[in-house]
Every structure is written in structure tokens, then in C-alpha cells.
Amino acid sequence: MLTYSGFIYRWIESMLKQRTLERVVKASGIGLHSGQKVMINFVPHHADGGIVFRRIDLNPPVDIPADAMLIQEAFMCSNLVQDNAKVGTIEHIMSALAGLGIDNLIIEVSASEVPIMDGSAGPFIYLLMQGGLKEQDAPKKFIKILKPVEALIDDKRAIFTPHDGFQLNFTIDFDHPAFKKEYQSATIDFSTETFVYEVSEARTFGFMKDLDYLKANNLALGASLENAIGVDETGVVNEEGLRFSDEFVRHKILDAVGDLYLMGHQIIAKFDGYKSGHALNNQLLRNVSSDPDSYEIVTFDDIETCPIPYVNVT
């Protein structure tokens, strides 16, 4: 006979739980805009603590929650801003956290931006896995979209529609020799596996003609072909070429995964983006937030019923 306590134990065992890291992981890299060395530490955080960036170079240190409502747009990047403190270039690490299903983490940084690493989420996936994933005794929460929500700016659009899973469809539109038409659209059904193998290694990209202007404005001082795909008038400048034939649009999906994780929980919906970027992705989240009837918070008592497959915690 199954006792009440046994039932509770079995229910907790099968429940999809929140995740953090087992241990602290420390790394460093170059800030994309400052060009300076940035220290970054990944520190385990308690259940329901969420993702928090901590500026340890400030005295006293300032905590900035990874919250879409704290995003302020700046030239060429998004910044989380609170109490006159900011942290930028967060989308690649947010994307990696979403991919591994990490709910709670403190990310200590020694500057106003996260290091760019190689311009993708791959190095962050590697570092986070070094910390080991740890389940916590609290149900993992999701935001389930219940009706269509859209954000539009000029001819750009970002749309959520109800879907049993998290599917991302993205189209870019560049009239340029480097951007072949057949490689300007991509779709992924989000899971740890599809994210890690099909999205996480896709690098950010930029036009060489813009670089001089950016550096003259004290931006992109750390940008190089070591951390971005460079594009000139004829094509890709990097000697090694592209990692995927459609790496450009895959990176836009990577950015969208990170931008949308700022809602505080993983979203269950279909996302369609056409020429969307950080600002429009953020506006979409604000539109969801302003309409309580458009979503609900859900949990899964049985891991098997969750429509998003995550890597197992061993």
C-alpha cells in the first residue's frame, strides 16, 4: 500500500524541478565594447532566486535581476539597468542558461558587460557544464502563451502563438553576397540537444565597414575575427569561413532564445521573428506582460509531460 508520505515522495521525484549549479565556476574574457578583460563567476543560487547579475567591481556590489522590464536599449546592444548600474551583452549567456534549463544563478561580473568569448553561446555551455547541474526541491515554472501576441516596428515583426513546446522560426533579409537567400530562414524545436548542437555555436556577425565608426564612438573596442564573423562587400572575411551554411540566422535564433528568457521562465509557445532584434524581442515580452490574459504560469508534476526536453541532471 502506498502511504501518503510515499505518494508525496514519488510525486516530488517525478516532478520537473528547478536547476542551479553544483559549484562555482570562474572564467574571464574580453568585453566586446570596452576591449577590457572581464572576470565572470557563475555562483549557485537558491530555488526561486532567478538569474541575477552581480556587479562585483562596484562598492558595494549591485545585484541586477535578469528581468525584461529592466532592459534599456543602447546603441548596438541591450543593457540591464538598475540603481544606475548596468550590465550589457547578456543575451549569449542567457541563451546558454535557457538551453540547459538553469533557473537560478548569480552571475558575478567585474565590468558593465559580460565577456564576448567567441561570439557564440558555446563557451558558456562548456563553462556551465563544468559546474555540474543540480536539481532543487521546487517545481520548474514555465510561461505558457494562451493567445497570439505580436510586436511590430516598421517591417519587422515578432509574434507568439500558442504551441505545445517552444518552436522558433526566424527570417533575416539581407541583400548582400554573403547572405544567400536559401540560408536566411531557419526553424528549431527547442530542447537542450537542438540548442547545443544546432544553435549554441553560431557566432555574432558584423560588417567591416561599420567597425571603424563603432570604434570611433568607443564601441566594439574588443571586436575581432576571434569573436565575430566579419563581413565585407564580397563575403565572409574569417579564414575559417562559417560554422554552418546558415550561421547568420542561427545566431539570430540564439539571440532570441536569450532575449526571451528574460521573461523569468522558459516560454511555451511558437515564436516567429522576421528581421527582429533585441529591441523588438523585448517589446514582445512587454506586450505579454501587459496582458495577463495572454499567458499562465505552469509546472509539470511529471517530467514526461513537459513538451521541452532538457538534458538530464546526473
Image (cartoon, rainbow, N blue to C red):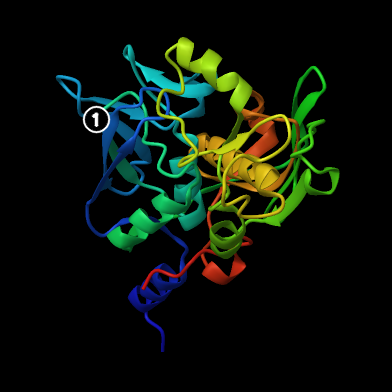
Residue name at image x 52 percent, y 63 percent: 310
Mark 1: few/some/many CA within 10 Å (<14, 14-19, 20+): many
Q: Which residue is mark 1?
A: 110
Residue nearest the viewer, comparing 244 with 92: 244
Q: Is residue 122 left or right of residue 179?
A: left
Q: Is residue 140 left or right of residue 210?
A: left
Name the image quarter holding the N terminus.
Answer: bottom left
Residue name at image x 39 percent, y 58 percent: 126
Report the number of discs: 1
User: Regarding mark 1 in the picture, which secondary structure is present there?
Assistant: loop
Q: Residue 209 is drawn in which quadrant?
A: top right
Residue nearest the viewer, comparing 300 with 286: 286
Q: Is residue 121 above or below residue 75?
A: below
Residue name at image x 36 percent, y 30 percent: 31
Name the image quarter holding the C terminus.
Answer: bottom left
Single out the residue that lies furthest toward the bottom.
Answer: 1
Residue nearest the viewer, comparing 1 with 148: 148
Q: Is residue 128 left or right of residue 147?
A: left
Circle 1: residue type: Ser
Looking at the image, can residue 72 be seen?
A: yes
Residue nearest the viewer, comparing 263 with 250: 250
